[in-house]
Image: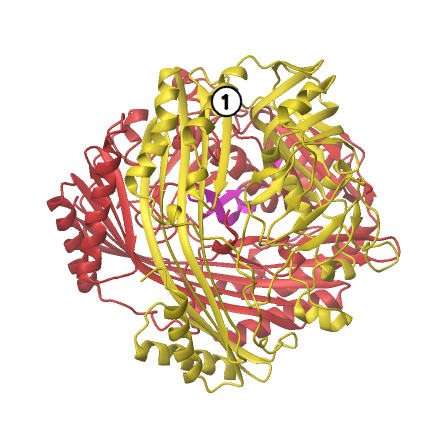
Amino acid sequence: MKRKDFLKIAGIGMGGMMIPLIGTRVEAFSSLTGMSVSEKKELADIALNTAKMAGASYADIRIGRYLNQFIITREQQVQNAVNTESFGVGVRVIANGTWGFASTNNVTKEGIAEAARQAVMIAKANGSIQSEPVQLAPVDSHGEVSWKTPIKKNAFEVPISEKVDFLLEVNNAAMQNGASFVGSNLFLVNEQKYFASTEGSYIDQDVHRIWPTFNVSLVDRESGTFESIQSLSSPMGMGYEYLDGNESEKAKGIVTRYGHSYDMIEDAAQLAEKGTEKLSAKSVEPGQYDLVLDPSHLWLTIHENVGHPLELDRVLGYEANYAGTSFATLDKWESGDFEYGSDIVNLYADKVQQGSLGHVGYDDEGVQTKRWDLVKDGILVNYQAIRDQAHIINEDESHGCCYADSWNSVQFQRMPNVSLAPGKDKLSVDEMIKDVENGIYVVGDGSYSIDQQRYNFQFGGQLFYEIKNGEITGMLRDVAYQSNTQEFWNSCSAICDESDFRLGGSFFDGKGQPGQSSAVSHGSSTTRFDGINVINTARRI
Amino acid sequence: MAILTRDEARDIMQKVINLSKADHCEVNLQGSKGGNIRYARNTVTTSGEDQNTSLSIESAFGKKTGTASINEFDDESLEKVVRRSEELAQLAPENPEYLEPLGPQEYKDSKTYFESTGQISPDYRARAAENSIKPSIDNGLISAGFLEDEADFSAIMNSNGLFAYNQSTEVEFSVTVRTRDGRGSGWVSRDYNDVDLLDTATASDIAIQKSEGSAEAVALEPGKYTVILEPDASVGLLGNMFFRMGARTADEGRSFLSKQGGGTRLGEKMFDERVTVYSDPFHQTVPTAPFTGSGQPVDKTMWIENGVVKNLSYSRFWAKEKGVEPLPGPVNAIMEGGTKSTAELVASTARGILVTRTWYIRTVDPQSLLLTGLTRDGTFYIEDGEIKHAVKNFRFNESPVIMLNNIEELGKPVRCSGNMIPPMKIRDFTFSSLSDAV
């Protein structure tokens, strides 16, 4: 990671989190309405024709305007309000069976033609060390089409002052309820993408995402201890309406959790209170427990031990140097009987779920999006593949999960939404807990780490409750669990029904070299896993 | 256009300052030009080139500030960006932590730019990749690697007369070589400002040897072991500590440097007396720009000396609150060590584990800085001063604070991700479980 490419979020709240600084900082989004579609088409045709004239057998172009807004506050003040805007084009070609890519922010006929020629030159320079010529799966020619995230309220059009006031109100709620410190942030993304390829598609898309989040810290100076708790929000593929806090989207219980509508002020108040309780909570006794995992926690487990290992490029070795490979090798899939999980486990991929981060009409190589199964009745049945990989798993079409995080990044296979299907029988969270003799109920995602083939993992969380003989008996601290992916999913013994299904997700999932981030959601209902190894993480220094 | 000279940068920024009507303003101008090649399965996969230049201005009226940026440089665009930032500043709430820009500063030169790196071509990158791919094919192995190079400049000017300018280059190379049966894996990484120091063939040979040597891994019981951490294995663990030495979080009671009952652990001996860590932008092997993003000069700073916490970093605001001098955070980490190579540390070890690389390091507890992660791409059992066999990878749960109290011996520091880190022999390093991953 290069420090200069990232914007460091201030304060301990984000744990030193680095977010990608795509583009330059600007005061206002003058470009909410930019270049017309006809102008883009004209430029696109120049790139495609130039590439073909220079010897490309295939070419695509993405003309992108990427808008971000980050508002960062702590306690009673705004630390930073950052608007970034980035505009440019990326041209990708195949020449001599080899990929080449070049990008430019000189969005003129000349600049684009030059980028197209440069991409072809790079492809040809690398042709001599190419031993696997690119093979593309067929794709429909869509002609001129458009798609837009179905938002109700464009967050970029909400005045900055309104957003700032709201975050300060969130902070106030936390401080009033016992927090020692609080930091809150709002991240907004709008990708305006125009894609065209020599396959005959011209696709204009307007994609929106939002992530409100905060962190409360509780400090006991006398004992020298502190706790930090992250909000229970999820990043979403929605507009500002996500912050409406509708009662119908709340899952009530010992902790209130949220679906497609988030009550950030209420959450700040409850987590400040819960944090105070956690400071003096019982330190967990290590051992085997039955875990009841809320969707606000389980999304990250799904992401790490289902989403990543089933990326076909990882399986094949394309990510071996950085992210790693995968335990879910082709022979296991070919056997048709590899038991990824117990028979109630059904995991699917999609780019079509409403409100999800992955929701788009077409991917970044012009493939219409869809839903498909990855694990069916516990058996591994498929992977995630794009156009140049589909033939490897005997398919004749891409799954539509190709993505680039900017105009100046090359598109490649990125994780679609990957979700656990809800249980088929009616089952509430309370009913699930009633059946647990010795367990822990985990809410919120925490520290996470997994090996480079996705076997061994360790996850923490935000809030932990001890379950004894079907009752929640109190809060725990210092909890993390370790397991192995296949053992873990085979210990899955119960899944709540559809009424409990909620999304979690990652706004900045990293992959590739040079690194790119993407946003992805993972849905599930509350789920039970039996006999999982729990460790105690407390240490003295 | 991507890389501007000092004079070209100064002219553009002065023009912007002259347009300003704010009480204060600060202008940042930066540009970069570079390329990369990526390969896997012994063949090139993606490759590209990129360049960009951008200017941002922060305008302030009292404590109200606004920031705007642009990447066009004609007179009309420059006027537009100044007015935009001023309009936003007028609308913004006051930031009580805002301090007016610094006055003129003196900077020493840091040799961060090398023309050799600035001139890298697509053909150079292809040959660099071939240096891994060909020997891997010849040895029946599979390589996956990445090379990225960049030349850039950054400049700062403000309305109080400060001007700073720096050009730098960097090249990074890494390769993983795996056996065809997937049972062995080796890795190597190199980074330099000057590409003439990079030898991808020699580096790739190390990954090839480790790949072949790690194929017959034996499972050992998790537990506490003496380990020899190669610099690439410890840099991630140490970085999680070195770059968290801020005074504010420590004063606020939420850092590993907070003291029970209030205050910080500044001046305390927290580590073995052989631990000395400083940062230095002028270090010959790991040079960086000699100023921060707001133009504060950066000089050599001692953070830990003979095991004692010598300094915490203070932002200008926090320094003013506490009545001390501001101190920018570390620009790199230079840890002192001894004279021995990793091989010599192995030779003096009765029983231990050699770790090539650590992976997926995450904080488990910020209070104790307990970190978790895994070993990867070459983990070996040492007995009587020799590497006996490969071992299966482990998950570790360990705090760098505890680790730096358990030092047996430090070797000779080498450049590692822009830092200088010694190989180190550590006792009682905690492996908490086994991983099947190769």
Say if B131 sits above or below B151 in the image. above
Q: State the image quarter where residue B407 is shown.
A: top right
Q: State the image quarter where residue A477 is shown.
A: top right
Residue A338 is covered by the magenta coloring = no
B79 displayed left or right of B160: left
Number of residues whose C-alpha sits closer than 10 Å to that of mark 1, classed few (under 14), some (14–19) or many (20 or more): many
Percent x, y of residue B169: 44, 50
B19 displayed left or right of A145: right
Residue A516 is covered by the magenta coloring = yes
Along the viewing direction, whichever of A268 and A115 lies nearer the viewer: A115
Residue found at the very far left of the displayed protein? A53
Q: By what rule are the colours in the image chosen?
A: by chain
A381 displayed left or right of B320: left
Say if residue A113 shows up in the picture: yes
Along the viewing direction, whichever of B15 and A74 lies nearer the viewer: B15
Provide the letter of the chain coloured yellow: B
A369 displayed left or right of B193: left
Q: For mark 1, what is the residue?
A: B185
Say if B404 sits above or below B304 in the image. above
Provide the letter of the chain coloured red: A
Q: Quadrant of the N terminus of chain B?
A: bottom left
Main secondary structure found in the magenta portion = strand
Q: Amino acid at mark 1?
A: Ser
Specify the segment rendered in magenta: A498-527
Q: Residue drawn at (65%, 17%), measured in percent from left and top?
A: B381
